Amino acid sequence: MILTVIIFNINVKHEEVEQQTELMYKDNTIWTAVFNADENAINRLIDADPNIIMSRGVVGECPIHMLFLYGTDQHLKIARNLIIRFPTIMTQVYNKSKYYGENILHIAIVKRNLAMVKWLLRNIHSESNRQQLLTATATGDFFKIGQPTYYGETPLAFACCTNQWDTAEILLKHGADMNVTDSNGNTILHMLVIRNLRDIYTKFKSYWIEHQAVTKSITTENSTLMKPLNLWDRLNKDNLTPLTLAADTGRSDTLSWLLDERKKIQWTYGSVSCVLHPLDQLDVSIQEKDKKHPQCVLEVMIKNNDSKLVNPIIISLIEKKWKHFAYRILIRRFFFTLIYLLIFLATTILEQTRMEMIIDINNKTKITNDKDSNMPYRIAYIIGNTIVISGVLFKGACEIKEIYILGLKKYVHSTGSVFLENLLSCSFCLCILIVQFLRLLTIRHETIIYAFACLLAWIYMFFFIMPFRFTGPFVIMIYKMLFNDVLRFCIIYIIFLAGFSQSYFVLFNRNGLQGYFSSVKQCFLGLLGDFHFEHYVKEQYLWAGTLLFILYVVIITILLLNLLIAMMGDTYKDVKRSARQLWHLERTRIVLDIESGISASKRQSSINKYWVDIQGERYLQVEQMDDDVFHFIENKNT
């Protein structure tokens, strides 16, 4: 129903644009006269009915809008004469949903007509209407976020987002507001990140800083005025600054450029520089977990699972975190987990150990248990099982606490290594608790669940070897192959398996559900190469059975299996090509997961501190090398 309404609305708007085109070719209308730039016809129609200049078209346009939209010299000459004659038409905007809010200044900017922009803002007839021209917002569907014409709604944003700094300067000199935001809360700096216009970003930011310096010097006497928040630190409605927006939109080059722009150079020595990178917006905030704070670049990168955003600054930050606290905590957790798994293994072995005695009575063999001999094993088993259950309860409580802190939605939608850790932890704890519950109720068949719990427990160790360079890329490769290639293969194979199994079931007239499962088993064994021709071909239907057998071998054994191998080979190449970035992304994910479990007071302790404090702000201090510095100096001197 919703989809039908959306399609209907799109069709209606498309029909309106078509009707607008048809109006241009009808005789004796203002729209035809405007289209043909026929000044005499326009004047005749206005003399006959002066209100015709205020008439509206099918998409909410006025004649003055169409004159600017066609934009030839003749059209603009007529537009200027009409504005001089009827000054109020300058402020007319489209009044229907598709182009709502657009005025002639918007159109002149998009048409890149600097001369017309100057004329509109400087003309004596426009002084009273200038503010309305500058503050009009184009909020119609044509200008919504996600559209190619999303330029930030205001004329100043239009000029900046279409890479026209000369036009933007004219607008600023005539009073355009630099702090303006659109309906999405985006400032012009946000918009410039979306449009990937770095030069305009630099110029606009510099202009804003200069304007703030002038404003500050004028208002120094009034000490009650609060210092405004820097334009580049302001949040949009998604709680993103321009920097974090670059990360959220996946603009890796722009993100690296913005991070490099914020750095402070402490000193240089030849090709080595000591650089300070501010950690606000880049790193997670040092505050209590119950206090909400905007997402930083690291959190956005993890949320979007975007390895392309990994750059040297982020790598340096994660390396500092790893050395100062993450490595120590992870190794401690690794040893505790390893000891727990060894106890779990010993408990399982003790549970499966039975002291049996063979007694021969009247030449009959009887097997019995010696309970007294089993007693030490039972005591050891009870102790081990108590430790296993206690560990499950402790880990379950930790997972519940994490769900409470992060929220169920964020916890469930975690990705990568953290998703693996959450899934395995919850599955293992749930399996062990179900096994214990079934045993208390003396319900059998808990062995299957217990067997799967054993497998999950040891797979959990992959989480601990992923942050290390030696094993991490290999684990990532297995993860990608399992959840991409193998999963895709299984879905396709199940379809073929069901079809071939049912065919053999009918062809060989097997009995009931058990007969169908027998066909499924035989076909599955064929996938593994365990072919027995007599199971697939019967004398009664020799040719049909042979044909099905050949088809099965060709499709499953030759085609699908080789396709799986090819897919795995492609995955291996892709992962190997981007292994460094993928590994750094997973390492970042694990480090942030470890950090989220540390209280704010412990994070600020000297042993865990990985930053430097400068005037109350946190900075990451790194030494960077620039091997091209001497080549640059040599070329400059030459």
Image (cartoon, helix red, strand yellow):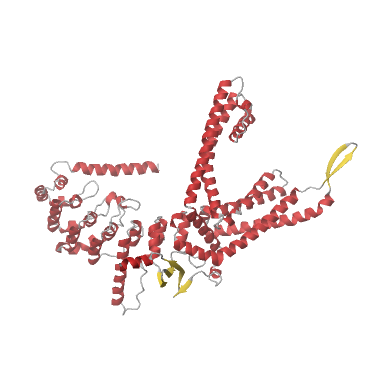
> In x, y percent, where is residue 606?
55, 72
> In x, y percent, where is residue 473?
53, 53
The residue positioned 26% from the left and 55% from the top of the image is 101
Q: Does residue 389 appear anywhere in the picture? A: yes
Which residue reaches farthest front? 638
Q: Vertical placement of 438 versus 218: above or below?
A: above
Which residue reaches farthest bottom? 221
> In x, y percent, where is residue 568?
52, 44
Which residue reaches farthest right? 362
Q: Quadrant of residue 376?
A: bottom right
- 458 vs 171, nearest the viewer: 458
Is residue 511 left or right of 181 when viewed as pictured?
right
Q: Vertical placement of 605 versus 574: above or below?
A: below
- 78 vs 493, nearest the viewer: 493
**Quarter occupied by the C terminus:** bottom left
Q: Quadrant of residue 494?
A: top right
Q: Vertical placement of 431 versus 215: above or below?
A: above
The residue positioned 72% from the left and 53% from the top of the image is 346
